Amino acid sequence: MERPDSSLKAQFKAIRPRYPELAGKVALVTGSSRGIGKGIALRLARERMKLVITGLDQVETETVARELGELEVEACAFWGDLSENGNINRLFDQSLAAYGRLDLLVNNAASLIKRSIFEAGEDLLEQQLASNIKNPYLCAYHAAKIMARQQEGGSIISISSVGGLQAHWKGLPYDVTKGALDSMTRAMALELADYGIRVNAIAPGAIWTEQRNGAPEEKTKAVAERIPLRRFGYPQDIASLIAFLTSPEGNYITGQIIYVDGGITAQLSPRNQPI
């Protein structure tokens, strides 16, 4: 399948900015040193937002922030496991010290491991409860406290999954955590509406990221054929919706789980495999 140029500079230049109102606003994107999170950061950078880049690996995270800086984008880096004691507090303290405000939080960082019920032990359950529920909850809590003090409010967007609605085969405990993330989105949207803070989630389907590079072509084609649009999505398919929801054009949308999946959740069974 056709894949986009992997260089950050080429990807950045290929994006068409559409929302001048976002220029100068501040976005914190967790897990933005690679994959979908990096694509989201690139789109927001193209809109001239100021970025907080986070990731587990110091070199990888600082490289993304530095390369954005070379493109005249204001970006700072925070690396470390958000599940470790005090890291979320430090992340938000550093963000405020750098920019003095926060307009957008994207809860993207997550553990993506999927297992059968007999393979998913207690350790994996605890890890995913921390990575996929506790961390996004606490990040949203800290972001909401900052945004509630701002006259303009803000936006909180979590990256969920089609697995929060329809279970993967052998999708535990991942699908459980994404279903909980969807519920968290709706509950927080109701509570934070009075503060002008909108809370939504985006549920991607099969998205092609650099982690899939090297996958067998035959397997890739077989997966694509089970998707109604017959192709994988790309990080920019998610990022474009993030930009829209953050812009004034999305200011009446809150409490929603929006599926960006090529039609996966609309189908009862793949083509030529009727039930």
Image (cartoon, rainbow, N blue to C red):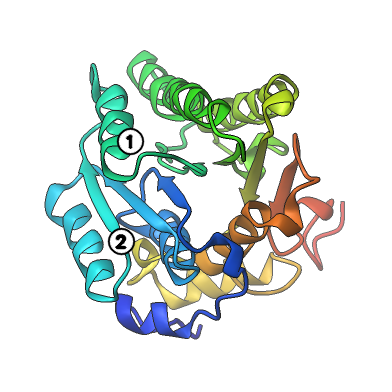
Q: Could you classify mark 2 by the number of other residues whose Cα lies within 10 Å: few (under 14), some (14-19), or many (20 or more)?
A: many
| Amino acid of disc 2 | Glu
* Residue 34 seen in the current view: yes
> Does 135 sit left or right of 188 as displayed?
left
Compared to residue 112, the image places residue 20 above or below, namely: below
Q: Is residue 3 left or right of residue 271?
A: left
Residue at figure coordinates x 25%, y 62% from the top left: 64
Q: Position of residue 189 (x, y in %)?
A: 71, 28
> Disc 1 marks which residue?
96
Q: Please, what secondary structure does the residue beneath circle 2 have?
A: loop
> Residue lying farthest top?
122
Separation (CA) of disc 1 from disc 2: 14 Å
**166 with respect to 135 (left or right):** right
The image position of residue 239, as x and y in percent, is 55, 62
Residue 144: where, in percent of width, then height? Answer: 53, 26
Rendering quarter of residue 94: top left
Q: Going from the N terminus, do you reach mark 1 or mark 2 first?
A: 2
Q: Which amino acid does label 1 sit on?
A: Leu
Label 1 crowd (10 A; few <14 / some 14-19 / many >=20): some
Which residue is pictured at 41% across the width and 45% down the height?
28
Residue 74 has which mark? 2
